[in-house]
Image (tube, rainbow, N blue to C red):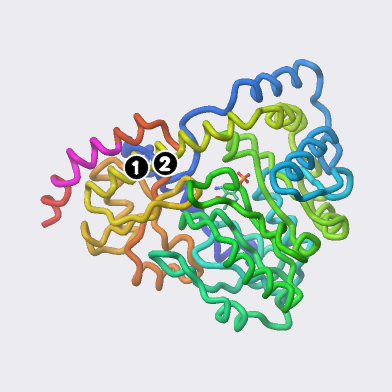
């Protein structure tokens, strides 16, 4: 019998949709993993690390040289300075970092405030700490929010404001003014900000990523989380990291030490090479993603979806109400089975999925795929969508 604290959770929608995609040989635009590989130099560095006997436990906080590189990059990129020894920590992916942050900071009855829709591990991480997740909506189609609504949701038990920018699944990149309003609220209510910035390099002009830790007074109350998964197309490596003031860092290193202890040593060694890549890597990275985004946007719009160009991430949230008026789970299953293109129902990113299913007609498509893969999805939509629709009526 599943322990009670897990009973609200079932097999994740990412696994379900990927299984369904495999069963129907669908183009899998549901789960956000690239169908291309990360830079050869990083892979080679990890292979060399294994051959060079870098195979025993790393320090729990992460390989010193990797943390030094991470601190250097955070300083160069954003002007944020952290002492690599006491303020930078390596985790097994951003996911583990999120869990350790919440477990380290929150106890039973404490509250974590976040925007909805949200990345799926936030409720689980909160529940495992015995804490309570409270949400305030980002409202489609522009994903705007009200700070007053957020302020009204703060209670004497609220410890953490959990942010995610660029934001999955909406593709929103919070702008300076929005971040300033959140920073003001955090200072007014004395909240710790945990900010999930795994898509920090995935923004599209004119949007730009700004870490909330950059704003006045925020560095020392913010834990910034990022990961190598998206930036270097290495989602299977699960190497994530945090930047935070020494006192906050001490709190999140404890759960890490007693759960994972340390992230895989040779992969950490490989990641050191990632930070030797020059600006060209990032420019090319964004250029390629802009092409992928525009390709998929064109395809979806051509076939009846209504979608805004995302400002960041590698997701497009598409309104399908012009195609069918059915709940999103049904629509995603139908598209996967009958058209051979898999996507994710947006309701799975809400606490009250039932209600979201009733009110929203949105699905999420991932474009971290070769242009040929996206074009194959386009061909299937062209060939099979009219037929599938005719069959239904
Ligand atoms: N946060 C967000 C918003 C994500 O979309 C993801 C990956 N889908 C993660 C965290 C997890 O990152 P990692 O693979 O490094 O654990």
Residue marked by disc 2? 367
On the image, the x and y values in percent for residue 328 come to 34, 60
Q: Is residue 194 above or below residue 130?
A: above
By secondary structure, the bulk of the magenta-drawn segment is best described as helix
Q: Is residue 387 left or right of residue 215?
A: left
Ligand 1 contact, mark 1 (Cβ < 8 Å): no
Ligand 1 contact, mark 2 (Cβ < 8 Å): no
Q: Residue placed at 40% from the left, 73% from the top?
A: 355
Extreme front residue here?
Answer: 206
Q: Is residue 244 left or right of residue 287?
A: right
On the image, the x and y values in percent for residue 111 come to 68, 74
Residue marked by disc 1? 296
**For residue 51, what is the image quadrant?**
top right
Q: Secondary structure at mark 2?
A: loop
- Magenta stretch containing residue 240, yes or no? no
**For residue 142, what is the image quadrant?**
bottom left
Q: Is residue 256 above or below residue 116?
A: above
Disc number placed over residue 98 in the picture, else none: none
**For residue 112, what is the image quadrant?**
bottom right
């Amino acid at each position: 019998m599943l322990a009670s604290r897990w009973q609200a959770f079932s097999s994740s929608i990412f696994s379900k949709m990927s299984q369904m995609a495999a069963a129907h040989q669908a183009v899998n635009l549901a789960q956000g993993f690239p169908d291309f590989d990360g830079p050869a130099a990083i892979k080679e560095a990890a292979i060399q690390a294994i051959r060079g006997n870098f195979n025993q436990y790393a320090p729990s906080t992460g390989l010193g040289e990797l943390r030094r590189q991470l601190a250097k990059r955070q300083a160069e990129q954003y002007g944020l300075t952290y002492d690599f020894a006491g303020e930078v920590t390596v985790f097994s992916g951003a996911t583990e970092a999120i869990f350790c942050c919440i477990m380290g900071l929150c106890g039973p009855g404490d509250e974590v405030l976040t925007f909805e829709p949200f990345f799926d591990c936030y409720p689980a991480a909160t529940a495992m700490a015995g804490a309570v997740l409270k949400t305030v909506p980002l409202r489609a189609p522009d994903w705007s929010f009200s700070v007053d609504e957020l302020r009204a949701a703060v209670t004497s038990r609220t410890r953490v404001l959990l942010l995610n920018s660029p934001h999955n699944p909406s593709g929103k990149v919070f702008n300076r003014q929005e971040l300033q309003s959140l920073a003001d609220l955090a200072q007014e209510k004395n909240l710790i900000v945990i900010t999930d910035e795994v898509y920090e390099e995935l923004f599209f002009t004119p949007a730009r990523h700004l870490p909330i830790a950059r704003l006045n007074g925020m560095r020392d109350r913010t834990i910034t989380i990022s990961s190598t998964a998206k930036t270097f197309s290495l989602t299977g490596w699960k190497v994530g990291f945090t930047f935070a003031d020494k006192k906050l860092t001490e709190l999140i290193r404890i759960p890490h030490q007693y759960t994972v202890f340390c992230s895989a040593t040779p992969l950490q060694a490989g990641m050191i090479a990632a930070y030797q890549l020059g600006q060209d890597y990032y420019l090319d990275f964004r250029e390629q993603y802009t092409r992928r985004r525009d390709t998929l946007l064109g395809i979806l719009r051509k076939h009846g979806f209504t979608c805004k160009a995302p400002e960041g991430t590698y997701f497009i949230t598409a309104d399908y109400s012009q195609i069918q008026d059915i709940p999103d789970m049904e629509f995603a299953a139908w598209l996967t089975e009958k058209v051979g293109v898999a996507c994710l129902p947006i309701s799975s990113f809400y606490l009250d999925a039932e209600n979201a299913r009733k009110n929203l007609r949105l699905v999420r498509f991932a474009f971290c795929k070769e242009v040929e893969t996206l074009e194959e999805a386009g061909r299937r939509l062209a060939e099979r969508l009219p037929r599938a629709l005719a069959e239904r009526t």
